[in-house]
């Protein structure tokens, strides 16, 4: 067991040790990619990045020839690339840092430790993603309301029936002022009742637009 803490790289590295480190980095990339995609929406380019980052970091750190200070500085630039792109959620940022850490471990020759570390952290990430939380039931609700309907109290009984909590976040007029568009943040009691909730709202607002969306949805994707 103690062999996992032994580096395969001595004072100089050979082609075989380089290929082993690269293969281990690729394996770590696959694990991180699978964990990041578990119960989450990821783009092809983001998954490709997670696959390649450990191998790129491994190669760059090996090229600095054991200079730890330079290696850490170079590795930091890879993580900073994330903050120069469009904003991502905490899980995406953690996945980037995990990929960089795996690449660093492989570059130091601790390939078994790198794979084990990546497996453990990825397993924790998947376990947390699989735990149901109140945030999973928090949704954004948009209702188009005729000007003849008082949106401030017209749906109170429906909110009490289908949600644990709700709050009005934004209201604006549309369609030349003949409609109001009210945006709410709601925590559904049961997501399986979403259709019934929407149908009852449509009966109140004259069958106008009703939209429920995840609060994590964004026009930009990584």
Image (cartoon, rainbow, N blue to C red):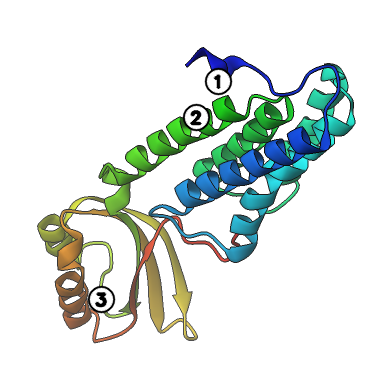
Disc on res. 212: none
Q: Is residue 118 above or below residue 215?
A: above
For label 2, the SS is helix
Q: Residue at x 22, y 74 (%)?
A: 198
User: In the image shown, does 54 or 196 lie closer to the viewer?
Assistant: 54
Residue under pointer 1: 4
Are there few (<14), some (14-19), or many (20+) residues within 10 Å of tag 2? some
Q: Residue at x 72, y 51 (%)?
A: 85
For label 3, the SS is loop
Q: Is residue 27 above or below residue 39?
A: above
Q: Is residue 27 left or right of residue 62?
A: left
Disc number lying in front (1 or 3)? 1
Tell me residue 207's x, y (percent): 25, 86
Q: Residue at x 39, y 34 (%)?
A: 124
Q: Is residue 64 above or below residue 200?
A: above
Q: Residue at x 57, y 63 (%)?
A: 43
Residue under pointer 3: 149
Residue under pointer 2: 116
For label 1, the SS is helix
Disc number lying in front (2 or 1)? 1
Q: Is residue 122 left or right of residue 152?
A: right
Are there few (<14), some (14-19), or many (20+) residues within 10 Å of tag 1? some
Q: Is residue 41 above or below residue 61?
A: below
What is the distance, in whole Å, between disc 1 and disc 3 at their CAs?
68 Å
Q: Is residue 138 among the parts visible in the rendering?
A: yes
Tell me residue 84's x, y (percent): 76, 47
Q: Residues at badges 2 and 1 in contact (C-beta under 8 Å)?
A: yes
What is the distance, in whole Å, between disc 2 and disc 1 at their CAs?
9 Å
């Amino acid at each position: 067991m103690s062999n996992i803490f032994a580096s395969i790289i001595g004072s100089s590295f050979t082609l075989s040790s380089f290929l082993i480190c690269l293969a281990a980095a690729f394996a770590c990339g696959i694990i991180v990619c699978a964990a990041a995609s578990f119960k989450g929406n990821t783009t092809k380019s983001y998954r490709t990045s997670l696959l390649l980052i450990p191998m790129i970091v491994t190669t760059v750190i090996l090229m600095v020839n054991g200079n730890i200070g330079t290696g850490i500085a170079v590795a930091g630039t890879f993580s900073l690339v994330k903050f120069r792109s469009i904003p991502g959620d905490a899980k995406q940022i953690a996945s980037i840092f995990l990929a960089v850490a795996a690449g660093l471990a492989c570059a130091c020759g601790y390939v078994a430790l790198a794979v084990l570390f990546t497996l453990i952290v990825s397993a924790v990430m998947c376990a947390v993603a699989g735990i149901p939380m109140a945030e999973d039931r928090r949704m954004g609700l948009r209702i188009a309301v005729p000007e003849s309907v008082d949106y401030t109290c017209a749906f109170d009984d429906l909110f009490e029936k289908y949600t644990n909590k709700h709050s009005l976040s934004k209201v604006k007029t549309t369609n030349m002022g003949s409609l109001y568009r009210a945006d709410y943040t709601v925590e559904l009691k049961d997501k399986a009742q979403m259709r019934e909730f929407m149908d009852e709202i449509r009966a109140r607002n004259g069958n106008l637009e009703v939209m429920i969306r995840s609060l994590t949805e964004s026009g930009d994707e990584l």
